Image (spheres, helix red, strand yellow):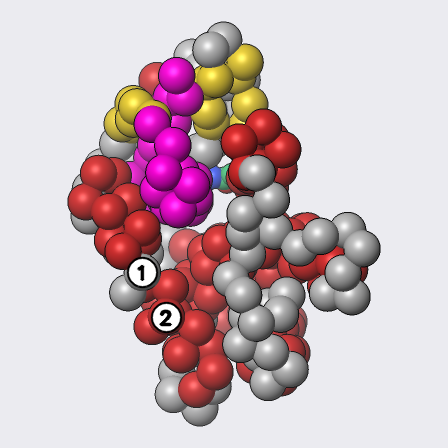
Amino acid sequence: MITVHHLNNSRSQRILWLLEELSLPYEIVSHTRTAADGLAPPSLRAVHPLGKAPVIDDDGLVLAESGAIVEYLMARYGDGRLSVDPGAPEHVRFVYWMHYAEGSAMQPLVLKVIFDQIESARVPFFVRPISRGIGRAVKAKLVAPEINRHLDFLEAELGRSLWFAGDEMTTADILMSFPIQAAAARAGLDSTRPRLLGFLDRIESRPAYLRAIERGGAYAL
Ligand SMILES: N[C@@H](CCC(=O)N[C@@H](CS)C(=O)NCC(=O)O)C(=O)O
């Protein structure tokens, strides 16, 4: 039996969604972000040394890292579904987006979260103008332009096909969902990029996506 160690409002939502798309049976062990800092609770570190979500346990095989989990589940249970055949022309795009989601898209979004925290950090009053200034300057000069470059790129790519790797939804789209949702929640993705908003509408209305929310609990970034 597959067990998903699920952290609320996190990347592990994608794994629940994938399992629902594949109609596989699974159990959820829920971990709740701490009130103090919003990080994962120590219970996740008992499952995997890094203490990050998602982690799965498939009959004793413990695996972390979203992309690795998706590839493992697809190789073992996918039966060719939600995938692109290695001989098909879109295969290279499929591989690219599978890696890009965590390898590139998430980086500037995580930096934004970090520098938002630096900007609003509770620090002694005489340090506050400095921490606020650093947070704002790094975001304006480095982080926001980088995020915008990624969003422009993604918006243009969705002009090539309905989904990231062609006209059928694949696991590349499942992995891409989190950075795009995070950009909509916290990094200014809005109606000026209608294809990305259309992508979110399409995934968020899928029955399997909605079942995953129902099982995993409320999901808000
Ligand atoms: N690249 C990793 C990132 C894992 C990660 O950072 N997960 C976040 C959840 S979205 C987490 O566990 N955050 C809580 C913490 O850092 O304490 C993956 O895709 O699995």
Residue at figure coordinates x 58%, y 28% from the top left = 76
Q: Is residue 35 left or right of residue 129?
A: left
Looking at the image, do the residues carrying marks 1 and 2 touch, with CB atoms under 8 Å apart?
Answer: yes
Question: Can residue 57 be seen in this snapshot?
Answer: yes
Residue at mark 2: C-beta within 8 A of ligand 1:
no
* SS for callout 2: helix
Q: Which stretch appears magenta? A: 1-25
Instruction: Inspect the image, locate mark 1, and give the three-letter code of the amino acid beneath it.
Output: Arg
Pinpoint residue 144: horizontal percent, then vertical percent: 56, 75
Q: Is residue 10 left or right of residue 162?
A: left
Residue 163 to residue 46: above or below? below
Residue 27 to residue 150: above or below? above
Residue 110 to residue 199: above or below? above
Q: Residue 116: name its quadrant.
A: bottom left
Q: What whole-number distance in Å separates the C-alpha atoms at marks 1 and 2?
A: 7 Å
Instruction: Inspect the image, locate mark 2, and give the three-letter code of the amino acid beneath it.
Output: Arg
Pinpoint residue 198: horizontal percent, then vertical percent: 40, 79
Q: Is residue 181 left or right of residue 115?
A: left
**Magenta stretch holds residue 167:** no
Residue matched to label 1: 206
Residue matched to label 2: 202
In which quadrant of the rendered image does the C terminus lie? bottom left
